[in-house]
Amino acid sequence: MTQDTLSEAEYDAITDAAAHWCMRVHADDCTEEERRAFKQWHDAHPLHAFEYEAMLEIWDVAEHLPRPASAPVMPAPQPSRSWRQFAVAAGVCALALPLAAYTGWSLGWLPDSYQHFAATDTVRQVTLSDGSQLELNLNTDLTFSNYKDERRVTLKKGEAFFTVSHDTAHPFVVRAGEGRIRVTGTRFNVWMYQDQVRVNLIEGSVLVTSNRSLPGDGLRLGPSMQARYKQGDYMPQISQTYAGDTSLAWRNGKLVLDNLALSEALPLINRYLNNPLELADNSTGAIRVGGIYNIKELNNFANSLPKVLPVYLTRNKEGNPVINPIPQQPPKS
């Protein structure tokens, strides 16, 4: 089965299966046998995974749907079914029924368009349905949903450069980690590794918050400013970028390390690696490294380190390389 030869009925069957599995996997009574069957279905075809991701977006949206005060004409739900599961089912139906979909859109519950983009081994340029332009760095995964009251990007991993179409009445929101970046039209970059996020503003202005659950839109950035935050931060850290800032060198296929401590450099490097590098101790993290590297060749970075730094490599129990300092010999008397 290939995506190019699927009939409309086959597409519908995959969408129905994705909705079914989304509800079953999140159900309290989901069995291990069902989870194995879901994984087998999910991995059987790329379109299965894509449709399931779309259903997860609806699942997340359903969490914010208003719960009806009473529903006398509805049968009582079974104990294993939550309101959220019924909301997902309603959302799936809304996507299938034009009138219901319009109602969901007009109330701001459901998007009228959804896009998923990923870049693996090459930088990728994409255009969102609102006309905004994005550049995706290697190993980047994000989704775009267009709601009535906002345009929403969820950066799941990686890094992207945004050129956002201006629309004051329709703000553009990027969710990255625990925080949020809110704009109406501008150019900026968002980098994310694990729970760390860095926002660089090139043009326009953005509002950055490190915790979406907090009230308000966060702190405002102007051009040549940067915001950093990680999980648990009450507020992002704001700083000015200098004229020779190289954080966007990835757009030219490069990673520039400007005499950084290894503790600062590893998050920038590890997001490109199949097996992330680790530090043996804090003293190892203080060793400084520099250079210009091709982002497509960074998997060779670990093997080159002992040639340029006073370190050697070992492996931890997970098989990941660990950087160890070479003990310095005491001076001879």
Image: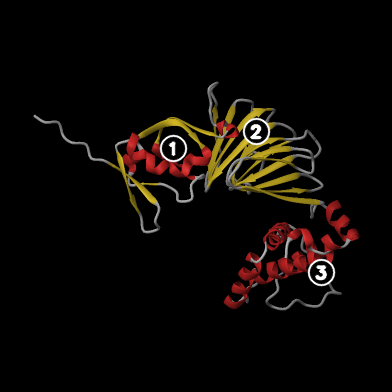
Q: Is residue 21 above or below residue 278?
A: below
* Foreground label between 2 and 3: 2
| Residue picked out by circle 1 | 264
Residues at marks 2 and 3, CA–CA distance in whole angstroms: 45 Å
Q: Secondary structure at mark 3?
A: loop
Residues at marks 1 and 3, CA–CA distance in whole angstroms: 54 Å
Q: Amino acid at mark 3?
A: Ser
The first of marks 2 and 3 along the sequence is 3
The quadrant in which the N terminus is found is bottom right
Q: Is residue 134 above or below residue 35?
A: above
Q: Is residue 296 left or right of residue 117?
A: left
Answer yes or no: is residue 162 visible. yes
Q: Position of residue 275 (x, y in %)?
A: 45, 51
Q: Secondary structure at mark 2?
A: strand
Of the pair 332 and 188, the residue shown nearer to us:
332
Q: Which mark is residue 70?
A: 3
Q: Which mark is residue 199?
A: none
Rendered residue at 58%/32% (across/down) = 252
Q: Position of residue 173 (x, y in %)?
A: 70, 42
Q: Which mark is residue 188?
A: 2
Q: Amino acid at mark 1?
A: Glu
Rendered residue at 86%/58% (across/down) = 101
Q: Residue furthest left?
A: 333
How many numbered dots are placed on residues in this image? 3
